[in-house]
Image (cartoon, grey):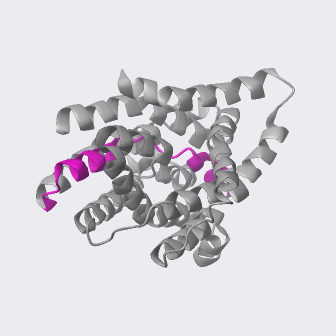
Amino acid sequence: MEFARLLFPDFSLIATGYLICRYTALDRPVWEQVESLVYYVLFPVLLFQSIVRAPLDLDAASGLIAAGLLLGLSGIAMAYAVPHVPLLGSQIDRREHAAAAQVAFRFNSFIGLALAERLAGPQGLQLIAVLIGVCVPLFNVGAVWPMARHAQTGFIAALVRNPLIVATAAALSANLLGLSVPAWLEPTVNRIGGSSLPLGLMAAGAGMQFGTLMQSRALTVSVLTIRHALLPLVAATLVMLLRLDASQAAVLLAFSALPTASSCYVLASRMGYNGSYVAGLVTLSTLLGVASLTFALGVLR
């Protein structure tokens, strides 16, 4: 029930966007402009501030960093392998897979930050900040690569033009150099970044079409199984192999079971893919997060 309460705000915002788009004058053309604002301005500011807010202690968290990177690489590898699985691959549209693969390994950092604080207090926030700092660049590259490759656009050019990757790289550089947002500017930056979550989730709801999920059932089941069942099992294995302490283990397990990132929809849509399908996956992932977090923290932990 605790995880259901934690996830309810995200799901309710997605539902609100869906209802507003379908039953008011604020239809798709309005939300397309909102998507652009979120993608090019609001999400990059949020990512930058989330990463530079707390100094990264790379030495103290080396085991957790290794576990996070191995977990991320496992998720990316499994997501990329889906079209090549015998029997399953023939049922999957490669273009749909290029956009949906990111759902299998990306994560909702807002829910992660809130949950880490409940699990381990201020130390939990520092640990999840480390995971966000080292994994977001890897995951964003993993998300862009199949879409750029399938669209036959330059991968490096796609990365350079991607505002989420640019913001993450700039934030990591600033963090490691000891730079931070000036105190007088923090309230403005926090407000700009904070607005990205509700608008991004509502835009995902506005673009949602559940019929597309039924047309790509094999792909839907595959990416959500990786996200909500296989990655928690990988995380539990890494906890044992790397002998993480109790706080690090709890944060890693929670991290492995989080719902996928709401920005998956924005990225897919802005790169010219089927955003409505990815929005449906984001919605289902948010619902499944209750079960996967209970499994990871209540059973595997």
- Where is 192 relative to 168, above or below? above
Q: Is residue 183 visible?
A: yes
177 or 277: which is nearer to us?
177
Find residue 137 and report its horizontal and vertical position in percent: 48, 66
Q: For the point 56% across and 68% down, which residue is it?
A: 180
Give the x, y percent position of residue 287. Answer: 45, 29
- Residue at screen point 49% across, 79% down: 177
Does 254 appear in magenta? yes
Say whether residue 54 is left or right of residue 190.
Answer: left
Compared with 94, 177 (above or below) is below
Tell me what residue is drawn at x 30 percent, y 65 percent.
65
Report the residue that reaches farthest toward the right. 25
Query: What segment is highlighted magenta in the picture?
Result: 242-270
Please tell me which residue lies in front, 86 or 18.
18
* Figure quadrant of the N terminus: top left
Q: Is residue 21 above or below residue 233?
A: above
Q: Quadrant of the C terminus?
A: top left
Q: How many marks?
A: 0
